[in-house]
Amino acid sequence: MPDIHVEHAEHAEHGLAHQFEDLTQQQEADTLGIWVFLVTEIMFFGGIFAGYAILRWLYFAAFEGGSHLLDIRLGAFNTVALLGSSLTMALAVRSAQTGNRRLQVIFLTWTLILGGVFLGIKAYEYHQKFVEHIVPSLDWAPEGEVLAHLAPGGLNHAELYFFFYFGMTGLHAIHMIIGMGLLIWLLLRARKGDFTPTYFGPVEVVGLYWHFVDIVWIFLFPLLYLIGGRY
Amino acid sequence: MSQHIEPTKTYVTVFVTLIGLTLLTTGVAFIDLGAFNTVVALAIAFCKMLLVILFFMHVRHSSGLVRITVIAGFFWLALLIGLTLTDYHTRTWTSPPQAWSNSAPPTHP
């Protein structure tokens, strides 16, 4: 009987799981695995985007009115912050590939900071919605100027727009919070020098997830903030 | 799998382009293009998505298996949104069959 354990021990490499032949095969499996997960995420967000498309088409005036209550500057700033975090994430993966531990830690930290900036601004925007009483179900009582602005499109349909606004940005924010948890985990491992030019699967996989969350926002920004133009 | 390491310059160039497109889409929102405002906004978002997928997500240098997975995902998304919208947009094109309105309403036990 061949002694598999001895054979494996001889070739044991840092980070190689026992079910894989080598790190190259493991890396390919990691990448494919996370992409299959991301495809399920595409379908998950896709269903909501499809629902959004139908209701926006049916109640365009109400959606336009709701959209104009959002602050376009905050939305644009957040887009830049998130794109910046994607850049630092890509550079963190690159630093792992080149084996630079110091840069890995720096870029992962910046990714975390920019993610935090995004969520902070998002929280401020949510707070504003409570101030204006345009939170569907929980605090829906638009008054004064806000009411005059929303009334022409129909209040119920404007509420529907804000359901989509909170639902879509909320799910996006939950994905970011999970992503930031993963970044902290990576940061702790990167500090110990766990990732090498041959073994950097976790950095790559979390990176792909983070970029996907960025892509969702790339679509949410024009769809929620820029409806019908601001001219 | 290829262990391709992209130069830092490429990532920075892609990032600058993405920022440029963000400013462009924000600026276009202030110009009246009628229905084309939505078309332009989505076209710009699509370009940004392609840049992120191809460069940041390394699909440019990925294996065929990973590429086909990505393409299949977006193809299914296109079916989901495309066919749903086709349904909603064409529902009122024809009236319901005569037989439906002539038949007696269902009686409940």
Image (spheres, coloured by chain):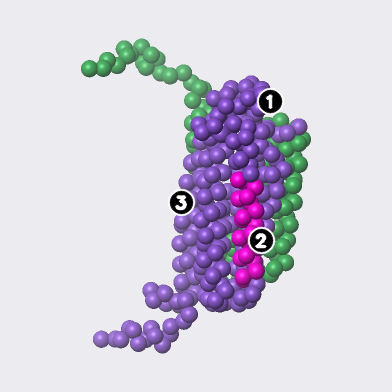
Chain colours: A purple, B green
Chain of the residue where label 3 is placed in the rendered structure: A
- Separation (CA) of disc 1 from disc 3: 42 Å
Q: In this view, does A196 lie above or below B14?
A: below
Chain of the residue where label 1 is placed in the rendered structure: A
Q: In this view, does A165 lie above or below B19?
A: above
Q: Residue at x 62, y 22 (%)?
A: A151
Counting from the top left corner in percent of width and height, residue A16 is at 45, 76
Q: Is residue A11 above or below residue A31?
A: below
Q: Residue at x 58, y 57 (%)?
A: A211
Q: What residue type is labelled 2?
A: Leu
Q: In this view, does A99 lie above or below A129?
A: below
Q: Report the span colored magenta.
A: A104-123
Helix, strand or loop status at disc 2: helix
- On the rendered structure, is A102 left or right of A18? right
**Residue A65 occupies which quadrant of the picture?**
top right
User: Which residue bears the numbered disc 3?
Assistant: A40
Counting from the top left corner in percent of width and height, residue A184 is at 54, 64
User: Which residue bears the numbered disc 2?
Assistant: A87
Helix, strand or loop status at disc 3: helix
Of circles 1 and 3, the one toward us is: 1
